[in-house]
Image (cartoon, coloured by chain):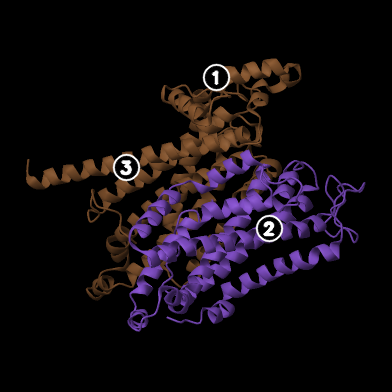
Chain colours: A purple, B brown
Amino acid sequence: MHINYWEHATTSVQGRIGGALLGAVLVAALIGPIVAGSADLPSRDIFHPPSAAHPLGTNDFGQDVLGLLLAGARLSLTVALSAGLLTTVLSALVGAGAVMTGGLWDRVLMRFTDVMLAVPSVVVIIVIAAYLRLNPVGLILLIALFGWPGTARVIRARTLTLVGRTHVLAARTFGAAKPYLLYRHILPDLVPLLLVGFLQSARRAVFLEAGLAFLGIGDPTVVSWGIMIQNALRFYYMEAWVWLLLPPALAVAATILAFNLLGNSIEQAVDPRLRRLHTKGVANA
Amino acid sequence: MRPEERVQIAAVLVFIARKSFRLGTLLVAVCVLSFWLVSHSPIDPVNAYVGADVMRVGPEQRAAIAAYWGLNDPPLQRLVNWGAAVLRGDWGTSMIFRQPVIDVISERFTASLALMGTAWVLSGVFGFALGIIAGARQGTWIDRCIKWYCLTLASTPTFWLGLLLLIVFAVWLGWAPVGLGVPAGVLSDEVTFGDRIRHLVLPAATLSILGVANVALHTRQKLVDVLASDYVLFARAKGESEFAILWKHGLRNVALPAVTLQFASLSELFGGSILAEQVFAYPGLGQATVQAGLRGDVPLLLGAVIFGAVFVFVGNLLADIIYRFVDPRIRWGGRYEQC
């Protein structure tokens, strides 16, 4: 089943819009801090409406909103990509590992996955993060720690069907060892699934990072979209909320939408009947 | 008693036993984990206990407090002590509310339950309806509209939709109050039912609007599958009307997965309600949990975590039971399908 999912993702409407959005955020995160310089320094120019000097205005500390937005993009994408990657690796290790080791290990790993699936992850992450006062690295680890079970189940199911395929059986008859089978025959067919899992985990990470920062649980020393939104809420009675709230809020929504659309387009390419991975915690809470 | 009935009852008993065992292990795991977390927290328990009087307490007094609360005992001993107290019904006293934890949780949970229940029912009903419309009119503009609406909504963070509603309806239009579960400055006895409803509208709307997406997309896909099946083709060939097909074949086959999905989404709803409660300053359990975490209120935090775990477990259990009533193919004592 070697479908050219990449081509579908780059030609479908959803894939194109998602790719463009993600590309824009990526560029903003990469070159933003260079262009904007140290724009997050406080100044006396507070609540300045958008102007040539400050394209998105300034906030209550006189910080340039555009500068903060770009710095926030860096944090959001860092958390999204690393938490997404870590989650995917974990789920692949558990899912494919359970099938390849088989027997008792399979049962133990799947019971454990079931238990983890029953955990209300958003709530637990909020509580743990509130208690431990995590920095971004800790947050990434925490998100990955509670994000893998859903994808792991899907990957296990897929691996199980792949192991029974004739070409894998044929390779086994020729005496192929398990690592070779995994690497040569199973992993390539798991790639689209892993990619979808990665995009969904990344999307979740964006949401969680912004949500925690919004609740006041994030690392206060790092510029985050969530903190910007929380800050904007304090000034809802002023004109300033327009340029304080809308930029970070739209940025969060656009980033999440980008991951969502990309994931959907790849899913559709792999499975035209589109069984969405309706696993717990994948959707927005 | 007929043999089949006896088998049936035995199967139900096995089901109950298995679920109770699960709940037991879940609670033990949650307690041990929370306890471990608390004992590794950067918050000093003596400081947290003393609170504002921290400057007036000398080292001897601190030692006395630590000894009184058993803070010098080995961790395992403390875990057992605490567990025994919880089993006796003594959950401790919340430090930020100055009330027994049980009281705080029951009061807050009632408020949360009203919020979550409303959002749950509304999102379920509207999500199902939207999914049916989109699925029945697959490929048309209305289907595309609903699909994009859901995709975009699924990308909207709870808190920012909440903020949007808050600004538009509460600040600009002045239709709804800005946050809080009840009007400010009114004694709790004088709060009318109407007041509570008014304060519930915006947070419930936020959660419902977002909750629709998942059910709708899922229902749509299921219905599309059903309508493409052979038995629907046969029904069409017999000349049944589109409405009859939708009613007889569509709804029945689509309802079960939708109900299950809706129950399974309880934990997400719980997570979402924490954020929505924060935006609207709605005095629910989620808001109390965040406060407890931020301000180091250990007894309340532990109580809320345990309570949350039970709540989500019950949600999943209800889904399991309903599943078995609606679809007789799922056996009571049966093991879980191995995917």
Chain holding disc 2: A
Which label is found at residue B19? 3
Direction right: furthest residue: A44
Disc 2, disc 1: CB below 8 Å? Answer: no
Chain holding disc 1: B
Quarter the N terminus of chain B occupies: top left
Q: Residue at x 52, y 37 (%)?
A: B34
Q: Amino acid at mark 2?
A: Ser
Sooner in the amino-acid sequence: mark 3 or mark 1? 3
Q: Position of residue B136 (x, y in %)?
A: 39, 66
Q: Which sits in the foreground, B307 or B299?
A: B299
Q: Which callout, 3 or 1, points to the residue nearer the camera?
A: 3
Q: Which residue is mark 2?
A: A76
Figure quadrant of residue A69: bottom right
Q: Secondary structure at mark 3?
A: helix
Q: Secondary structure at mark 2?
A: helix
Q: Residue at x 45, y 63 (%)?
A: A277
